[in-house]
Image (cartoon, rainbow, N blue to C red):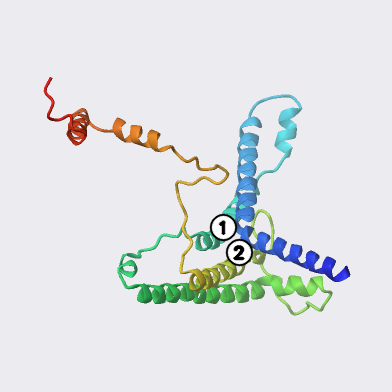
């Protein structure tokens, strides 16, 4: 009984980790986009509302400081761009010129696709490694050693942002994190292509959360006929009468 419970627990934990990993970019981008939109709205509303001479309210609004809002939103958009690139690899929405590759034979096409995926993984892996080294030297090592209670006397604490006064290594962490996730997505797509022979494809006409309704054949036929020019409708009707045997009949 105990082993069965352990198997069920580990299986559910594994499914949860896979679900989180499969939707990591969407959740991060959704949170950052919603937070940035809210901050921008509050900042603009505060700027205009503080101009009205309303007793007590104006003094309270002027006491609020939204000077950090622009800098924070810029940081959020940088993070959205990095994780959005990883999302693009996973869903296949990146723009690519594949006319030459699609004209090749199936075997050659598969080799070029795998080569392209591995090249993308190599490039993003290198960028992620260099970004991690830059972040480490820019003050991350100081923060980690200080958090662990280690000696930081000879270490560089790193610069801070002008308005928020955050350590810049926190902002620059988007480079190693986003590039590493992008590298993982390239490898994930490459492995999936080797197994199934299919690449992720994004339907730009599909909206998540809306189920596609199957249009009856009669409705499709009427829709096509409704788009025809009157002359084409007459021509189509004449051919239909000829096929049915009515073309030889005279009024």
Quarter the N terminus occupies: bottom right
For label 2, the SS is helix
The extreme right residue here reads 2
Q: Assess whether mark 2 and mark 1 are in contact (beta carbons under 8 angstroms).
A: yes
Viewer-side residue, 163 vs 43: 43
Which residue occupies 63% across, 55% down? 28
Quarter the C terminus occupies: top left
Label located before the other in sequence (1 or 2) = 1
Place of residue 142 in the rendered image (x, y in percent of width and height, measured from the top left): 73, 73
Quarter of the rendering containing residue 146: bottom right
Which residue occupies 55% across, 70% down? 188
Viewer-side residue, 52 vs 214: 214
Place of residue 204 in the rendered image (x, y in percent of width and height, measured from the top left): 45, 49
Place of residue 69 in the rendered image (x, y in percent of width and height, measured from the top left): 64, 47
Q: Is residue 171 above or below residue 43?
A: below
Viewer-side residue, 26 vs 64: 26
């Amino acid at each position: 009984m105990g082993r069965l419970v352990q198997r069920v627990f580990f299986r559910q934990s594994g499914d949860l980790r896979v679900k989180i990993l499969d939707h990591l970019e969407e959740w991060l981008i959704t949170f950052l986009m919603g937070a940035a939109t809210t901050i921008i709205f509050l900042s603009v509303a505060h700027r205009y509302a503080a101009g009205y001479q309303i007793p007590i309210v104006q003094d309270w609004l002027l006491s609020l400081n939204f000077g950090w809002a622009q800098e924070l939103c810029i940081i959020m958009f940088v993070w959205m761009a990095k994780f959005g690139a990883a999302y693009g690899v996973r869903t296949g929405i990146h723009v690519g010129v594949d006319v030459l590759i699609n004209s090749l034979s199936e075997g050659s096409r598969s080799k070029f696709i795998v080569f392209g995926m591995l090249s993308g993984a190599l490039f993003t892996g290198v960028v992620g490694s260099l970004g991690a080294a830059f972040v480490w030297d820019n003050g991350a090592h100081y923060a980690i050693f200080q958090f662990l209670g280690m000696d930081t006397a000879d270490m560089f604490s790193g610069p801070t942002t002008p308005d928020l006064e955050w350590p810049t290594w926190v902002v620059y962490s988007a480079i190693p994190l986003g590039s590493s996730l992008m590298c993982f997505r390239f490898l994930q797509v490459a492995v999936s292509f080797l197994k199934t022979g299919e690449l992720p494809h994004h339907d730009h006409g599909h909206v998540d959360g809306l189920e596609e309704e199957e249009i009856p054949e009669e409705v499709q036929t009427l829709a096509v006929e409704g788009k025809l020019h009157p002359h084409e409708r007459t021509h189509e009707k004449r051919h239909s009468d000829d096929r049915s045997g009515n073309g030889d009949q005279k009024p």
